[in-house]
Image: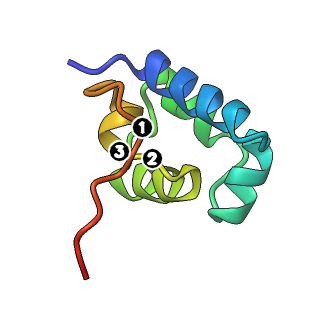
């Protein structure tokens, strides 16, 4: 299904592209310091955590899950 290690690597890669540390993301999203490590091991795959991280990194959850290589978010028209 989904490769949890790849998901964690996509988060790290996107953070690096935005010149932000993973630690800063986790603090700003009010997530535990081991969240990415738990994601990588497949033990923390909470939808809410993905949504917070995707919003912070301005990318889609689909991108983090590896379902697309398109980083941009489809935003609803106001």
**As rendered, which of 59 and 2 lies closer to the eye?**
59
Seen at 74% across and 59% down, the residue is 27
CB under 8 Å between discs 1 and 3: no
Q: CA distance from mark 2 to mark 1?
A: 5 Å
Q: Does residue 45 lie above or below 40 as drawn? A: below
Q: Secondary structure at mark 2?
A: loop
Q: Secondary structure at mark 3?
A: helix
Q: Position of residue 5 (x, y in %)?
A: 48, 17
> Which quadrant would residue 4 be assigned to in this image?
top left
Q: Quadrant of the C terminus?
A: bottom left
Q: Which residue is mark 2?
A: 59
Say whether disc 2 or disc 1 marks the residue closer to the N-terminus: 2
Report crowding for label 2: few under 14, some 14 to 19, many 20 or more residues within 10 A (C-alpha): some
Q: Which residue is mark 1?
A: 71
Q: Which residue is mark 3?
A: 61
Q: CA distance from mark 3 to mark 2?
A: 7 Å
Q: CA distance from mark 1 to mark 3?
A: 9 Å
Seen at 29% across and 38% down, the residue is 62
> Which quadrant would residue 67 be assigned to in this image?
top left
Left or right of 35, for residue 72: left
Colouring used for the render: rainbow
Seen at 68% across and 32% down, the residue is 17
């Amino acid at each position: 299904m989904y490769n949890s290690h790849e998901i964690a690597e996509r988060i790290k890669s996107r953070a690096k592209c935005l010149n932000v540390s993973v630690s800063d993301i986790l603090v700003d999203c009010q997530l535990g310091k081991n969240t990415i490590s738990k994601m990588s091991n497949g033990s923390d795959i909470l939808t809410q955590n993905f949504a917070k991280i995707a919003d912070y990194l301005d990318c889609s959850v689909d991108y983090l899950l590896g379902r697309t290589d398109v980083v941009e978010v489809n935003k609803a028209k106001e």
